[in-house]
Amino acid sequence: MVLVYAESPRGQFKKAAFEAVTFGKKVADQMGVPCAAIVLGANASGAGELGRYGAARVLHVADANLNHLDSQVAAAVLADAAKQLGATVVVLSHTSTGKSVAGRLAVRLGAGLVSGVNALPELRGGDLVVKKSVFSGKAIAEYAIVSPVKIISLMGNAVKPEATGAPANIESLSVSVPAGRIRVKDLKTVEGTVPLPEAEVVVSAGRGMKDPSNWGIVEELAVTLDATTACSRPVADSHWRPHHEHVGQTGIAIRPNLYIAIGISGAIQHLAGVNNSKVIVVINKDPEAPFFKAADYGVVGDLFEIVPRLTAAIKKFKANN
């Protein structure tokens, strides 16, 4: 069996969960085994929808102690579930949650783990051969997982969710839930925008904006494109923009379909977090900016002239189509 941990922050299922289940279903088909999804926490509302994306069974561990992440507790519960079900492959999303759980889970199951996988694996004998980006995205490495139990964490936007099935019934799964040592006193979340790891279009800007009061043109372009906004590290460090928008090696690594970089020079640390984007567009007045070497499309010029004109052109196109 392939077991997929479907994250449901605050009881809601997002794109990452549907990607993981779609991936798990494809791996299960290769192996000729069923795919099941597991949900942790008191609220499983909407979990049946995971069946549309390939989960033959949707299992629910209903315990309020799992509503807030304690990675040690989650790993213990998932390990118990995997043993009960005889799962030979466990799939997680390569999110902050998945990163904190995967290693602990691998230790508990004595499993081989490859994190940040970005493509479907190949089945070679009893081994799964997977690929992931290495050296800050400059190369692709191939790993064979030879252990009896295998754990994979899937990069965001690596697999497109495919709703090809029907809703599944939710089954209650009884496992031991150990007492956690983490207590959540307050929870602050960002609402109303697609999280950067899940975003398909990202509009990002850097110090070339000169002042935070100029960010309106970036936000208008993002709204026009239904995009998520981001920024470079110097901008976040200067408190021009919130830190959850910082993308790069020391921020959030993303792989959108379209990444528009405005007034960002393209230091190696920034490129490391965005160079898996499918299409990169760079707008910068410096023709020698390093970012142009990584760009699919580049515009040399004053961003304060180009960005409003680009936004106007997109609005006109959308109005006529």
Image: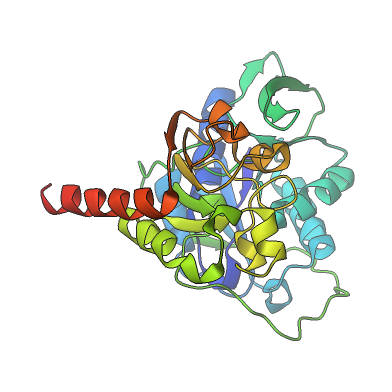
Location of residue 69 in the rendering, given as x and y in whole percent from the top left corner? 73, 68
**Front one among 155 and 162:** 155
Q: Is residue 319 above or below residue 244?
A: above
Q: Where is 210 relative to 303, above or below? A: below
Q: Residue 267: percent from the left, percent from the top?
A: 69, 40
Closer to us: 266 or 122: 266
- Residue at screen point 48% across, 33% down: 278
In the visual, does 112 lie left or right of 196? right
Count of marks, rendered view = 0
Q: Residue furthest top?
A: 125
Nearer to me, 302 or 63: 302
313 w.r.t. 292: above or below: below
Residue 168, given in percent of the width and then of the height, sits at 43, 54
Identify the residue at image location x=60%, y=75%.
189
Residue most extreme to the left: 320
Q: Is residue 98 left or right of residue 260?
A: right
Depth order, front residue of 106/96: 96
Asked which quadrant contains residue 64, the reply is: bottom right
Q: Is residue 255 above or below residue 48?
A: above
Q: Where residue 20 sits: x, y (%)? A: 56, 44
